């Protein structure tokens, strides 16, 4: 999956996670400041991402996420590594 398609899929996941439409999402956005995600939203989003992409996101990895770019980088690395076991 190319990065643009991954960004679009992530925007869809974010909308489902927060339960409301999310304006245009780009890589420079901060997850908390720009998207208004709190810790519960991040956990909800991580569960959706894991289910949608069949990857595993560890708590330690989630703690280091600041921007949409950070999340996309992590997702791409996990997808490239193969399905979660």
Image (cartoon, rainbow, N blue to C red):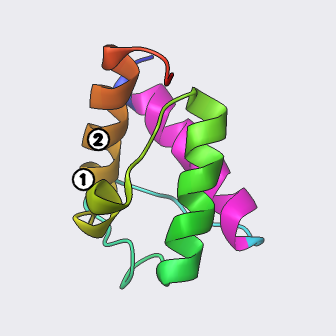
Residue 75 in the image: above or below residue 20: above
Furthest residue toward front: 85
Where is the N terminus found, in terms of image quarters?
A: top left
- Name the side, left or right, on which 82 lies relative to 24: left
Please provide percent x and percent y for residue 64: 22, 64
How packed mark 1 is, by other alpha carbons closer than 10 Å (few <14, some 14-19, many 20 or more), is: some
Number of callouts: 2
For this view, does 47 lie left or right of residue 24? right
Residue at image mark 1: 70
Q: Is residue 37 visible?
A: no
When the figure is inspected, residue 12 is found, relative to residue 54, above or below; the finding is: below
**Left or right, residue 54 beside residue 64:** right
**The stretch drawn in magenta includes residue 59:** no
Q: Are marks 2 and 1 in contact (CB under 8 Å)?
A: yes
- Image position, residue 2 (x, y; %): 39, 19
Query: In this picture, which residue range is highlighted in magenta?
Result: 4-18
| Residue at (57% x, 79% y) in the render | 40
* Residue 18 placement (x, y as % from top left): 68, 72
Q: Residue at x 24, y 53 (%)?
A: 70
Q: Residue at x 38, y 72 (%)?
A: 31
Say which of 34 and 63 sits in front: 63
Marks 2 and 1 sit apart, C-alpha to C-alpha, by 6 Å
Residue 57 visible somewhere in the drawing: yes
Q: Main secondary structure of the magenta part?
A: helix
Q: Nearer the viewer, residue 8 or 37?
A: 37
Residue 54, given in percent of the width and then of the height, sits at 57, 27
Res. 62 image quadrant:
bottom left
Residue at x 41%, y 14% (from the top left corner): 82
Secondary structure state at the residue bearing disc 2: helix
| Residue under label 2 | 74
């Amino acid at each position: 999956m190319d990065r643009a398609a991954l960004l679009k899929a992530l925007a869809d996941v974010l909308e489902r996670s927060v339960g409301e439409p999310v304006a245009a999402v780009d890589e420079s956005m901060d997850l908390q400041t720009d998207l208004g995600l709190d810790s519960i939203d991040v956990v909800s989003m991580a569960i959706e991402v894991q289910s949608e992409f069949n990857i595993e996101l560890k708590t330690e990895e989630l703690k280091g996420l600041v921007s949409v770019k950070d999340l996309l980088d992590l997702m791409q690395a996990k997808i490239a590594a193969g399905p979660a076991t």
